[in-house]
Image (tube, rainbow, N blue to C red):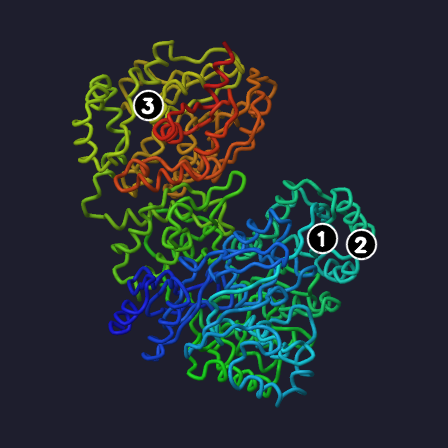
Amino acid sequence: MTDLEAALRRAVRGEVGFDTTSRALTTMDASNYRRVPLGVVAPRDADDVAAVLEVCREHAVPVVARGGGTSIAGQATGTGVVLDFTRHMNRLVGIDPQARTAVVQPGLVLDRLQDAAAPYGLRFGPDPSTHSRCTLGGMIGNNSCGSHSVAWGTTADSVRELSVLTARGRRLRLGQEWSGAPEGLRGLVDGELARLRTGFPDLPRRISGYALDALLPERGADVARSFCGSEGTLGVLTEAVVGLVESPRARALAVLGYADEAGAAEAAAGLLPLGPLTVEGMAVDLVPSTEGLPRGGAWLFVETGGDTEGEARARAEAVVRAADVVDALVVTDPGGQRTLWRIREDASGTATRMPDGSEAWPGWEDCAVPPARLGGYLRDFRRLLTAHELRGTPYGHFGDGCIHVRIDFDLLSADGVARFRRFSEELADVVVAHGGSLSGEHGDGQARAELLPRMYGAETVALFERAKAVWDPDDLLNPGMLVRPAPLDANLRFSVLPREPVDVEFGYPSDGGDFSAAVRRCVGVAKCRTTSVSGTGVMCPSFRATGDEQHSTRGRARLLHEMLAGELVTDGWRSTEVRDALDLCLSCKGCRSDCPVEVDMATYKAEFLHHHYAGRRRPAAHYAMGWLPVWLRWAARTRTAPVVNALAAVRPLAAVAKRLGGIAGEREVPRLAGETFSRWWRRRGGRPTGGGDLVVLWPDTFTEHLSPSVGRAAVRVLEAAGLRVALPPTLRGRAVVGDGTSRSALALLTARRGQVCCGLTYVSTGQLDRARAVMRRTLDLMAPVLETSAPVVVLEPSCAAALRTDLPELLHDDPRAARLAARVLTFAEALERHAPDWTPPQVNLPAVGQTHCHQHAVLGDAADRRLRESAGLTGELSGGCCGLAGNFGFEAGHYEVSAACAEDRLLPAVREAPDGAVVLADGFSCRTQLEQLAGVRGRHLAEVLAQRLA
């Protein structure tokens, strides 16, 4: 390997990675399979690709081309050298609007092409659900399709010319009439014309095998088309000319409800003569909530187009009239359509969990049958599932007869793997009996290639092998795929994971307490690799800032997988590779909500840091920022806040302090409040007033010591709404709820003083023993509150999220933790639930800012939206993460990424705000980031409302 690495470094200008991290990131795609490569190369151009092929040929090392790594059949993994085209060969070379073509490099993400074509009223026809991260090269390799294939076909239908390199270094320009054909290909076809004319099923989604029938003379001898779907086994794509289609000016979406999926499937083919753009289907067992959907147990999503909204709607209504439905809905609003489509697009991830939370896996992800036979096929498929005592949730492209499904295979035990094989063999026979294709979109890879003889027969498969030999006589390119395949039950990625649960701190309630199961959640669909987010989406800010796979949620999950496997990452919890990948995780928790399978990397990071630093000295920032509540309480008790502020204003002293504390030199130290929130509370009397519902206002660390104005404003608003406000007890023992100090003589004699804390700063730095102690002390203090029905109102979203999730998951053995978590309300939720008749003061101004990432991921912002609307605050807050994220943006080495995250959504939104707009930022981190990077003062919603009360 050393000789190979050295030769590659001499030969190519792009990056060569033979290190543990580079290899670990590419051991898997989105399939059930895992292969450990020797190294990864990110070529800069076609010359680099040629150089890699030459070196690997000399060393007899296979080469695998890889795009977004979202392949579901295993074809983007390999044991040799992986070519990563996403880093450099990812450009749109040009668009010709008149010819309706585009020239693209293989690493270009589909959405980037769509964005560039949109101003001309054009688009690329195929659009897989992974359109925000899949690449054109991968789409050509798999002959991808997507939801609009009933209108615009497969990727092969959109390919005009392909520039490829053969394994022996020949540069070919593939096209029609044998253009670019390697020597021997035409002779092979001429000798097998009868087989090519009769041996291939005629259906819209036949993706399995090589498309050799595209080389027939009556089909234009299209070498480029025949190359599509070859999964990187024939040549390496370096550039493509693709066709574009006219995008309808207006669209409408008809959602048709049926009693069950068989009824929807049987109806799909009958809608095709109406010329729809999509006919997508899914059943109720795949939908987390049916809110917004018409009545039914299954649905067809039928999109129509037109020059005007009225024309598109008329076509959609015609579809509804032609369909025999239980219920129907027609939506023309683009936002409403996006919301509905998101349900369908997230299915590739949500399908990996059964309704009861158990795991489900790909393997039979996309079989296709003639559309008219889909209903019968689905019934046979369901019967086969039942016979094998398996469960699955079919969905997909009903108009093309293509079904996606994840099945709850047991791929961890020998018996389960044996059942996986038996089911695969029997289902292949069912598909063939219905005149179908084993693959209708995602390719054969390792998942289905072994079964191709059942579909094509041994002689046609032998023809595939001969074609492979013409293109790649040395079997250098992606061996084990399509021809001479590896067994479908070999190289399973789960086989390397520990069979016994790993000793961990968090409870992982959704994964049965098993950390390995939590890590297995990442199936590789890579929604975290999107370069932009829509609406209030968050995931994954560090990837958007760096563009580096190791700083995506998927990349970190892959490294944790390899840490548990122990083959590549051999030092377990002490791994520096995992530590470095997690270092730029902001713990924003965006993946907890935005990842279709709810990977919670913030929790995994805290778990890892706890074990990684166990018994060892931690980074200085863990003591400076992790123990922030202690330092701030110390300053408050000694009344030295003015002194601390004065010293922090002396730049040389501040620089030394920041260096010693592991704090970024670019950061300003936030000023401490002269009077804490609790001291103000005691000064005004310290007792609730009024006769409304009692609410306990949580004095979080940030509100208490750094932004007491937020707490004072919240008290004013809550009391104006008629609520009685109290602070939590500060004495453990015989405490009294309602005065916030518990100053009774008996309490003073029998109790110990303390202050509630959610433990957030300790959790985010992985100091879980300390976090647990702080949380238990808090539960002791809150015991009297838990004996009442009073809600706990938390103003800082990150603290509210910690109480809702980290508290019960870390103290899973203490029932009080779950009780307190259930009491936590945000400011807006408290007003909505406990003062429903109160009308907020009218602000009547536009609002800008950012929904706090923890609010988005854990708490939800529906109540906040309604409160803003009621107060006359107009406009939408942006998504993303502010980039400061508690301790993250203050830590040395994080400033550039922190600032880049702010520039992603927050700062542009504030700069573009209309005059007089209110800048909302409920989180202290968000307000600090705005002040330090933009010189803008953000305000908590409570402050805005309190100001208007005057």
Quadrant assignment, res 333: top right
Residue 121 appears left or right of 929: right
Give the image location of residue 601, x and y in percent.
40, 48
Contact? badges 1 and 2 (CB < 8 Å): yes
Mark 3: which amino acid? Leu
Give the image location of residue 597, x and y in percent.
50, 52
Is residue 763 placed above or below 934 in the rendered structure? below
**Which dot marks residue 323?**
2
Front residue of 647/515: it is 647
Q: Which label sits in the foreground, 1 or 3? A: 1
Give the image location of residue 535, x and y in percent.
54, 39
Residue 193 appears left or right of 442: right
Residue identified by numbered label 1: 302
- CA gap, disc 3 and disc 2: 61 Å
Quadrant assignment, res 936: top left
Residue identified by numbered label 3: 706
Q: Secondary structure at mark 1?
A: strand
Q: Is residue 772 shown to the viewer in this render?
A: no
Q: Name which of mark 3 and mark 2 comes first in the sequence.
A: 2
Residue 93 appears left or right of 219: left
**Which dot marks residue 821?**
none
For image coordinates 43% across by 33% down, the residue present is: 907
Q: Secondary structure at mark 3?
A: loop
